[in-house]
Image (tube, rainbow, N blue to C red):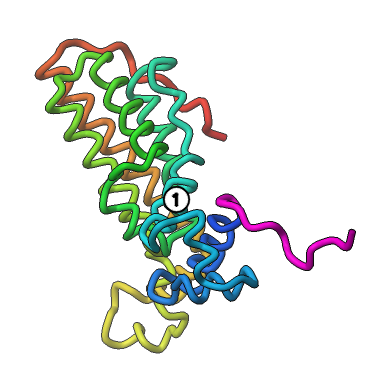
Amino acid sequence: MPRPRQALLNRQLIVETAAALIDADGLEGFSTRRLAAELGVRGPSLYNHFATKDEILDAVADSITAQVDVSFFGAVDWREALRRWGHSYRAALAAHPHIVPYLAQGPGRRPAALAMADAVYGGLVDAGWPPARATHIGALMRYFVAGSALGSFARGFVEDPGLYAEQYPHLTQAHRLAEHQQRVDEGAFTLGLDALIEGLSRTYERTVGALPPFPPDATAD
């Protein structure tokens, strides 16, 4: 029997192809017609696996959230768990920035997103945070991580020293930011995350109780 000219259509293949298209063209350029063409099938074939375009987007978003490591909660101090989760969360989103606005809408019914929210909330409550404050922390972390993953601060400055030389005397080195993108963006995120956790630690001590010394970052170089 001759082999089929294309891979058999299944949910995983649809999700992986949709994710690649969104990575390349953004959410605005994504359509089920474009997806079907990329897969080499007719549009209605997709609906044997997903009822709507939004279901496909949900599956793509959830596949990205599933890459985030939440195993730290309950295993290490809540501050270290937040720090490690924050870095894992940002890495997953930063690899797929075009889907971030969709992810930022919230977990909806997506299993991986709900599992992540459950692990974070449960870990914080178990660590002594009042439920309302645990909710606030989960929300502010999502704001912070999603915002950092939407784009590059460093690449927002053009590589033209003449632009800054005369009118912006404090930005004479801004044209060099793009060439140091990773260091600038990751450094800013790390600084912000550490400051956020330090502030939360003070809030904890004021409202819940004393904390042991802050644990060292086991992931640091």
Q: Tell me where residue 208 appears, x and y as whole percent.
A: 14, 14
Farthest residue toward the right? 1
Q: Main secondary structure of the magenta part?
A: loop
| Rendered-image quadrant of the N terminus | bottom right
Judging by the rendered image, the residue that carries numbered circle 1 is 59
| Rendered-image quadrant of the C terminus | top right
**Residue 173, image quadrant:** bottom left
| 6 inside magenta stretch | yes
| 68 inside magenta stretch | no
Q: Tell me where residue 172 appears, x and y as whole percent.
A: 37, 76
**Where does the magenta region start and end?**
1-12
**Residue 108, image quadrant:** top left
Tag 1: residue type?
Ala
Give the mark count. Answer: 1
Label 1 Cα neighbours within 10 Å, binned few <14 / some 14-19 / many ≥20: many
Q: Nearer the viewer, residue 3 or 146?
A: 3
Q: Nearer the viewer, residue 40 or 22?
A: 40
Residue 126 versus residue 179 in the image, above or below? above
Q: Nearer the viewer, residue 191 or 108?
A: 108
Q: Nearer the viewer, residue 182 or 14?
A: 14
Residue 168 versus residue 149 in the image, above or below? below
Q: Tell me where residue 159 appears, x and y as whole percent.
A: 47, 80
**In the visual, does 114 lie left or right of 205?**
right
Q: Secondary structure at mark 1?
A: helix
Q: Residue at x 31, y 88 (%)?
A: 166
Q: Tell me where residue 189 appears, x and y as whole percent.
A: 38, 48
**In the visual, does 214 lie left or right of 129?**
right
**Residue 215, image quadrant:** top left
Q: Residue at x 21, y 14 (%)?
A: 128
Q: Residue at x 46, y 54 (%)?
A: 60
Farthest residue toward the front? 1
Q: Residue at x 44, y 72 (%)?
A: 30
